[in-house]
Amino acid sequence: MGLCISLLLSSPPKTASTNNLSNRTEFWSTTTTLGTTNSTAGPRSQFSEAASEYAGGIVGDSGLILESPNLKVYSFADLTTATKNFRPDSMLGQGGFGKVYRGWIDSKTLAPSKAGSGMSAAIKRLNSESVQGFAEWRSEVNFLGMLAHPNLVKLLGYCREDKELLLVYEFMPKGSLESHLFRRKEPFPWELRIKIVLGAARGLAFLHGLQREVIYRDFKASNILLDSNFDAKLSDFGLAKLGPSQEKSHVTTRIMGTFGYAAPEYMATGHLYVKSDVYAFGVVLLEVMTGQRAYNKKRPKGQENLVEWLTPELKRKHRVNHIMDQAIKGQYSSKVVAEMGRITLSCVAPDPKNRPHMKEVVDVLERIQCINVVTDRSSTKTTVASSSRSSPHHYQYSYRAGAAGRNREGGRLESLE
Ligand SMILES: Nc1ncnc2c1ncn2[C@@H]1O[C@H](COP(=O)(O)OP(=O)(O)OP(=O)(O)O)[C@@H](O)[C@H]1O
Ligand SMILES: [Mg+2]
């Protein structure tokens, strides 16, 4: 999660500011209210709106809207115990919201337990310098406390004590898609890439399919977390918004996002649609295909923004093979590449109306996964072994020993900072 300074709303600076703790960026807009959007609409009204609209409902796609948030309320002392006093060696990472620690809790009561006993949890602690952290913290509690789906990370509880704001999540042992794609020396196997984007697509389709749709607004590789089975779960609902209801023509707001993932219409006008999430999804598809980051200012001029750089290639069918991650060549067939190119191109269409719904994207990716499995079975260089013939969703995963890793030190894949 990133910083966001609501106090400046009345006089926003015209320049974009970059959060130095993560590559989340705020893009400021002078437009705050359009259509019939209530000028008081903000995290608080959104919170109560969501609560009333979601109370008691059950929706399809194996997702649930919980009757009431069933979250454990922790004291700060509890979470100090669970993380051994926020010991640096238990830190999992750091984002714009603050540091994330591995802690231990009882698997039944969720009460803090001794390190090594019970189950692991990920505990996110707000950085005291984060001005807008409270709104993001509340949004996270609101959305993740209300929604349950196999492809959304589970929020177990929270703590609010004086200035301390913390969130307790299920622990995701395989980290994020971003860490596998860009921070490891070994190339990340293609079959897992497909499995992960399919899971993430299902999570997004669930949010977009709700009676009052939820715009996730922060879809990116670092927010796709992975369980022990490499099943994907979306995390970070700090920026999520309820989609426009019938009487509201659209939602506008402070423009926040991450360079390279934010949809062009959102950047230009502040208009936010579920299709803005579809654009960001297309960006992740392109990252997965190419092994290149969405935005890298160290790439040559004109290539910094991945979509701007590679859209012309996506449009020329015979060129799509050339943009694929060469480190995993042999793991994808030309048919799969062609299908991936097509769906990616439609997701990043400049006009949101021309982008597909996430349900359609799920269908396409399911087909791609089927073709892919057939290809992999006949391939000589399979790196992912299925542990169960009856279920292609269960994998034993291992990097190929001695695989030719890409040179990640060449400045090609550096982060935004
Ligand atoms: N539930 C979790 N289980 C395991 N690791 C987690 C969990 N949640 C977050 N992490 C790890 O903690 C780190 C920081 O996550 P965080 O969501 O705060 O920031 P981010 O997504 O990297 O950046 P941003 O602030 O731009 O969203 C990441 O490396 C992530 O992999
Ligand atoms: Mg995150």
Image: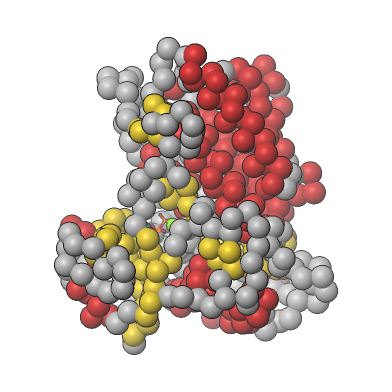
Q: Quadrant of residue 268 in the image? A: bottom right
Query: In this figure, what is the number of numbered marks?
Result: 0
Q: Residue at x 41, y 16 (%)?
A: 381
Q: Residue 156: x percent and y percent?
A: 40, 69
Q: Residue at x 52, y 49 (%)?
A: 220
| Left or right: 22 as drawn, with respect to 27 | left
Q: Is residue 121 above or below residue 396?
A: below
Q: Is residue 31 above or below residue 226?
A: below
Q: Is residue 315 above or below residue 163?
A: above
Q: Is residue 141 above or below residue 384?
A: below
- Quarter of the picture containing the N terminus is bottom left
Quadrant location of ligand 1?
bottom left
Q: Quadrant of residue 244 in the image? A: bottom right
Q: Residue 338: x percent and y percent?
A: 65, 23
Q: Is 115 in front, or is 3? A: 115
User: Taking the image as drawn, is residue 285 in sight?
Assistant: yes
User: Taking the image as drawn, is residue 408 in sight?
Assistant: no
Scheme of image coloration: secondary structure
Q: Residue 107: x percent and y percent?
A: 30, 65
Q: Residue furthest front?
A: 390
Q: Residue at x 63, y 77 (%)?
A: 55
